[in-house]
Image (cartoon, rainbow, N blue to C red):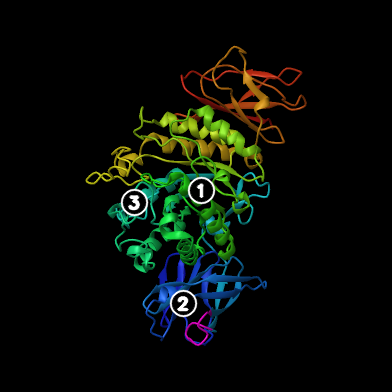
Amino acid sequence: MATRIIGGRIAPVLFLGTIVALAGLARAAAPVEAGKVAEISFESRKARPDPFHDVALDVVFTAPDGATFRVPAFWAGGSTWKVRYSGRTPGVHRYRTECADVDDAALHGVEGAVEVVPYAGDNPLLRHGPVRAADDRRHFAHADGTPFFWLGDTWWMGLSERLAFPDDFRRLVDDRVAKGFNVVQIVAGLYPDMPAFDPRGRNEAGFPWEPDYARINPAYFDAADRRIAELAERGLTPCVVGAWGYHLPWLGEARMKQHWRYLVARWGAYPVVWCVAGETTMPFYLSNTKAEDSERQKRGWTEVAAYLREIDPFHRLVTTHPSRTARESVTDPAVLDFDMQQTGHGTPPEGHAALASQGWDAMPTMPVISGEARYEALEINPTLTDADARKAFWSHVVASGCAGHTYGVNGVWQVNRKDHPYGNSPAGNNWGTTPWDVAMSLPGSSQLAAAARLITSIPGWDRFEPRPDLVAWADPAEKAPAPLCVATPDGSRLIYILKPGAARLTGLPAEKAFELRWFDPVSGTTADPVPLPATPDGAATISPPDGDHDWAVVVTPKG
């Protein structure tokens, strides 16, 4: 718990500590725990007709080791601007404001300091730091190198008032934290599946922008702040989607950059991941110029992504949510830190594996995850089940080297309420009416969480590489999709089969003894380990226990 300083009085708050800066005067450092957010407020005495557009304010922080961070400040309404900063290095972090209006002594040249003290809690995002790409550029890790398996959930419209804060929001958070999820994909107000300023996109303070995109609505983001802070406080990484792709032609590139600068200023100090856009190149459902819109969106969102990377002082991970792959959604994949894929609600498991494999092989090397796969309970024909969601998870995760995956369930992503279902999309279709609080308890989320626990229990899992050459059906005539396999350099393997049947393993080192344990993806249970006898040439045949469904098996060196 940090401290909040208001006029010299101290009151406890979660994750955020506030300092009120006095014009031109250095303040004594107010302690904030490493990784938590210090918020500093600045009050201008100048009257301005349009403060959002008229003032650009940055605050330059200097860490104890000499590193500097140019942090954008945000207009908080009225004559107030705020900056948020977090540092992981204990000691005094000094700051100085830089305002385009150099004559405003309340905004320009103000100096002060924030004292950062060691973090003493158990939140992994604070203890180990925010998520980054691991050194192998294939997996994820915390800032300190601790491996991180991305297990995301999809709350596209979770900042809307339909998921009421605090009660409903915290109920969903409690469920996901208890199951082991660690990422929430959430859109910053410019939503999918609706036109601009649709009432379904409101939160308790309205919309993120005023009508005609005249200026930002700070009150909207005050309400959104509480939700983003709640996620981070509970150890859930907010994967913030700036806007759905088709909003870019409506705002234009210049305003979309303003939107993103505001997001960086509000939330960049939190342990977030940035997702530049959702379905980046997909035009609005009813557009009459879809080809032109798609091409513009590809160019425009690449430009916005480059701008985001330029202004984010904390260098959070950047990706974009695609119609197929993030790489294909931008003109330059160098603006991305990882390849988020959309692998298809109607795509069979082998299709998810194929796209994952393509992502693994593509250059430049980066982690690959499916950010949208098969949403459980999605009412397409036929309605998707837990088995569909589960098989998509396993097929993509194993074929992409086990960096992670995002689950989705119909009812949660759009926040259906019992008394107020979401309704039709602009094209007229309806994805279903399952209420969010029913959807959150469907079996798929527990099955994927159990799968993630299994994966991360395997020694060296963060060094897994796809090795389809090490496994095949024992019966060469078998027509089912081939078994999938990842392996570590020391010989550990994780194998997934879509149906019961004997599989043949090869390449087992003759000098090592191995054991195997079968994992039931439906129940989430793991059998006791048993020895794995291999032939002198390093081959073995294995068969799953009884059960007419998919199976996973872990092979590890014995002893």
For the view shown, which residue lies furthest in the left direction? 419
Residue for point 49% across, 18% down: 546
Q: Disc 2 on helix, strand or loop?
A: loop
Q: Amino acid at mark 1?
A: Glu
Q: Which residue is mark 1?
A: 295
Q: Which residue is mark 2?
A: 55
User: Where is residue 28 shown, x and y percent of the image?
Assistant: 53, 83
Identify the mark nearer the N-term, 3 or 2.
2
User: Where is residue 349 shown, x and y percent of the image?
Assistant: 50, 28
Q: Amino acid at mark 3?
A: Pro
Secondary structure mostly taken by the magenta-highlighted segment of the chain: loop
> Would residue 310 be counted in the magenta stretch?
no
Where 164 sits versus 71, above or below? above
Depth check, front residue: 282 or 239: 282
Magenta region, residue range: 99-108
Residue for point 55% across, 70% down: 71
> Does residue 11 show up?
no
